Image (cartoon, rainbow, N blue to C red):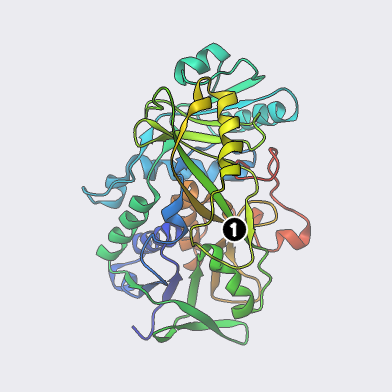
Amino acid sequence: MQSADIVVIGAGVMGCSVAWHLASLLPPAQAARVLVLEREQIGSGTSAHSSGILRTHYSVSENVELAQRSWPVFERFAEMLDDDEASAGLVRCGYLIAAPAGDKAAALADALAAQRRYGIEVHTLTACEAQQRLPIGRFDDAALIGYEPRAGFADAYLTATGFARAARRRGVKFLEGVAARGLRVQAGRVLGVETDAGFVAAGMVVSVQNIWSCELQRWAGIAVPLVAERHRVLALAGPAPYTPRMPVFKDLASPGMLYTRSYGGTQMLVSEGTAGERLAAPDTTQGDVSLEFVGDVGAQVAARFPGWQEAGLVSSWTGVYDVTPDWNPVLGPVPGVQGLVVGFGFSGHGFKLSPAVGRVLAQAALGLPTDVSLTPYALTRFEAGRPLVGRYGAGAVS
């Protein structure tokens, strides 16, 4: 294809969501004029390493609405995509979050109140009630415990490929193994995309390249406040199974603000929710998971889960976040570059927000009113001093 009406750069879960929403909003003949470029394979980038946790809990209220609008897609994935074989791999086990006394408890109370204002079902639990839901844990030190029963986790790769298949059925073209190498811009307007396979003329480009979004700085001459951070994830086997019926857990009292969930039916997936290892350049190569890190996280796990002092390490891996200064995404059109819509800097939130973000980016690309205002997520917010700062500090809980 030497020309397209819209080019989407990136076929991770976000790019595939954008493609599906474009196909849903356009007549079939116009959907066939949408092209998605992917440097490797669909879902093979940062999406492949996602922990897949789904929740609407945020201390940034704008994120609550995006997460809430995403839930129906995860819950009725096959129906929404009109594909009986589609699955997001959803496990609805609930989301438990505990805070110690002080600032974090106050932030948690405010976040739970914000969820209730959006009509989201959340509860406050006693330590005893929390232990009934997650019997392998202890909660006697918690000043406040929140519980979101509809939350859980899903599979980012299944979700991305499901979106892609649905978009293809409606006519969208995907080119895998073809990397975007630049934008052709003239007089402040996008003319198309330079690729490994040649130039593709297009008047609209949606860039959802995750950690590779930093390339926009060179391509379009815009500031891209973005760093790539590597995060480490462990799978542990303990004395009792962490079953899929047990909730995802967020421990605001632990030094690393740990998150945990069931993995493989009996194991614990665990990682820290704080800042990771900053990389000099975009890189999804598997990084080192040191024994020091394993020991440090293991000690935090043992403090929350009695008996897990002797937990065994089953496996480990790394994933990379695209992180902005306020740990929240940049969404929407770029001032001064007509025909360019971006979505980057998801900072660990991307998967859980991907259905709603894919839709609003598709709406923005088509010049339609967006379901939610993109003003809070504008690129200009950093220069204007209006960051979307979460109450829990730097990290993916926001």
Residue 187 position (above or below residue 129): below
Within 10 angstroms of label 1, few (less than 14), some, or many (20 or more) residues? many
Q: Residue at 39% across / 69% down in the picture? A: 40
Quarter of the image where the N terminus is located: bottom left
**Closer to us: 137 or 350:** 137
**Residue 299 picture location, percent across and down:** 60, 31
Q: Residue at 48% across / 75% down in the picture? A: 204
Q: Residue at 71% across / 27% down in the picture? A: 106
**Residue 248 picture location, percent across and down:** 47, 32
Q: In the rendered structure, which amino acid carries the disc numbered 1? A: Gly
**Residue 385 picture location, percent across and down:** 78, 56
Quarter of the image holding residue 168? bottom left
**Closer to us: 303 or 166:** 303
Tally of marks: 1
User: Regarding mark 1 in the picture, which secondary structure is present there?
Assistant: loop
Quarter of the image where the C terminus is located: top right
Answer whether residue 117 is visible to the viewer in this image: no
Q: Is residue 147 left or right of residue 242?
A: right
**Closer to us: 147 or 291:** 291
Residue 161 position (above or below residue 188): above
Q: Residue at 59% across / 74% down in the picture? A: 216
**Closer to us: 371 or 213:** 213
Quarter of the image holding residue 8? bottom left
Of all residues, the one furthest to the top in this rendering is: 128
Q: Is residue 4 left or right of residue 303?
A: left
Residue 142 position (above or below residue 343): above
Answer whether residue 54 is visible to the viewer in this image: yes
Determine which residue is flagged by label 1. Answer: 345
**Residue 253 picture location, percent across and down:** 66, 28
Of all residues, the one furthest to the left in this rendering is: 84
Residue 257 position (above or below residue 169): above
